Image (spheres, coloured by chain):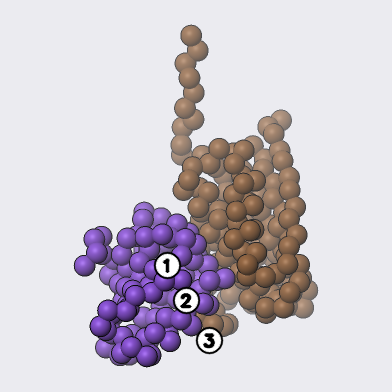
Chain colours: A brown, B purple
Amino acid sequence: MEHTNEMQLIFDSRSSNESFARVTVAAFMTSLNPTVEEVSDVKTAVSEAVTNAIIHGYENEVHSICIRGRTEGKTLYLEVEDTGKGIEDVKQAMEPLFTTKPELERSGMGFSFMEAFMDHLTVVSEPGKGTTVKMDKTIGKGRRLWTAQSL
Amino acid sequence: MKYQVQENCLTVFLPNELDHHNAEEIRKEADHLIEHNHIRYVVFDFKETNFMDSSGIGVIMGRYKRIYMLGGEVCAVHTNERMKKILTMSGVTKIMQIYEEEK
């Protein structure tokens, strides 16, 4: 069996924790030997998910956000969970440029960015209960591993 | 955050990481400067910036709307490959020119 590893991160939904969250996930994924590009992709996706939880899930109230991370083989699995107000219509929320908060200059690209930078994205949400964003990314796809010739 | 006003042009020197956390501050300060200095052109300087998410796109689009109403333009300079990718993906390059070298 290929190595697996798990972590859980629970932190306050303050905007100052956005960089903490993405840097922590970036550190967690280093064992997969990602490129700078792949790390940036994951950091952007985590940032979007956490920002969504803070602005939309909790509407700037301070509660807990939980990130669960798992590496299995070459794949990184992430879950970002809040127990905030949830999303009424997930399909609509995921449409590019759709936002419920244009007054806050939200561009409506959060989910589009997550979809673009990760391999898979699933959003599970129930109004009044909260939202969990599940995403994964396989590291080193289309990149041949460089292995030294044995002598 | 650092800003520079030269006649009717405002340069915003963006931070190392442009996310929701510091987007608010830039939005407030830039709008204040735009209002009080008859600004027509806004230059976003990405020299120090290595990370940006959709909150950054929101900041650019918001300033664009404001400046466009005043008959001006926004542009970006010193963007690295990553920033170019994010800007292109989001589509803001349709409303904002990226200049490779400072004008």
Amino acid on which disc 2 is placed:
Ile
Query: Which is more foreground, mark 1 or mark 3?
Result: 1
- The residue that disc 3 covers is A103
B55 or B49, which lies in front?
B49
Protein chain holding label 2: B
Q: Quadrant of residue B72?
A: bottom left
Q: Are marks 3 and 2 in contact (CB under 8 Å)?
A: no
Mark toward the start of the polypeptide (1 vs 2):
1
Numbered circle sitting on residue A45: none
Protein chain holding label 3: A
**For mark 1, does the 10 Å Cα neighbourhood hold few (<14), some (14 to 19), or many (20 or more) residues?**
many
Considering every residue shown, the one lying at the far left of the view is B103
Residue A147, above or below A45: above
Horizontal and vertical percent position of residue B99: 26, 64
Looking at the image, residue A82 sits to the left or right of residue B4; the answer is right
Looking at the image, residue B24 sits to the left or right of residue B66; the answer is right
Q: Are marks 1 and 2 in contact (CB under 8 Å)?
A: yes
Q: Is residue A10 visible?
A: yes
Amino acid on which disc 1 is placed:
Leu
For the residues labelled 1 and 3, the Cα–Cα distance comes to 22 Å
Looking at the image, residue B67 sits to the left or right of residue A113; the answer is left
Amino acid on which disc 3 is placed:
Glu
A149 or B64, which lies in front?
B64
Q: Is residue A87 visible?
A: no
**For mark 3, does the 10 Å Cα neighbourhood hold few (<14), some (14 to 19), or many (20 or more) residues?**
few
Query: Which is more foreground, mark 3 or mark 2?
Result: 2
The residue sitting at 50% across, 62% down in the picture is B17
- The residue that disc 1 covers is B14
- The residue that disc 2 covers is B26
